Image (cartoon, grey):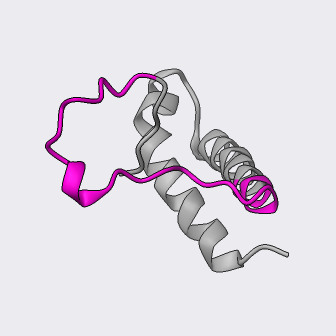
Amino acid sequence: MTDNTSFCLTTDVISAAIADQVRRLGGDSEAIRNISFAASYAVICWSLAAAERSQSIPRRPEETHNNRSNSGKDTTWAA
């Protein structure tokens, strides 16, 4: 079961991010809501699947934050 509070916050963030673009393409509030819910569902599914596999987005250690010896290729860093 998912946390409804997180789901609402996720949809709010996604709605804010896509609203202008959707409106420019002729979409309305209903389209923004539908896209936001679909995207939020995808985020939650990905999170649950990653947790099930005990995977996460690796974080860069603080001590190497300014170290440019790693080119960063094939590496995903969380913000």
Count the labels in the image. 0
Q: Is residue 29 left or right of residue 51?
A: left
The relative height of residue 20 versus residue 29 in the rendered view (above or below) is above
Q: Nearer the viewer, residue 50 or 54?
A: 54
Where is residue 50? Give x, y as percent. 73, 54
Q: Is residue 65 left or right of residue 40?
A: left
Instruction: Name the residue at 24% across, 59% down.
Output: 62
Where is residue 29? Give x, y as percent. 58, 46
The relative height of residue 62 versus residue 72 in the rendered view (above or below) is below
Quadrant containing the N terminus in the rendered view: bottom right
- Residue 67: quarter of image: top left
Which residues are the magenta region? 47-73
Q: Nearer the viewer, residue 59 or 67?
A: 67
Q: Is residue 46 left or right of residue 63?
A: right
Residue 61 on the magenta span: yes
Residue 27 on the magenta span: no
Instruction: Characterize the magenta stretch by its predominant secondary structure.
Output: loop
Instruction: Name the residue at 54% across, 50% down.
Output: 57
Where is residue 5? Give x, y as percent. 62, 78
Q: Nearer the viewer, residue 51 or 32?
A: 51
Where is residue 40? Give x, y as percent. 67, 53
The outermost residue toward the right is 1
Instruction: Name the residue at 71% across, 45% down.
Output: 34
Q: Nearer the viewer, residue 68 or 35?
A: 68
The outermost residue toward the front is 69
The relative height of residue 13 versus residue 21 in the rendered view (above or below) is below
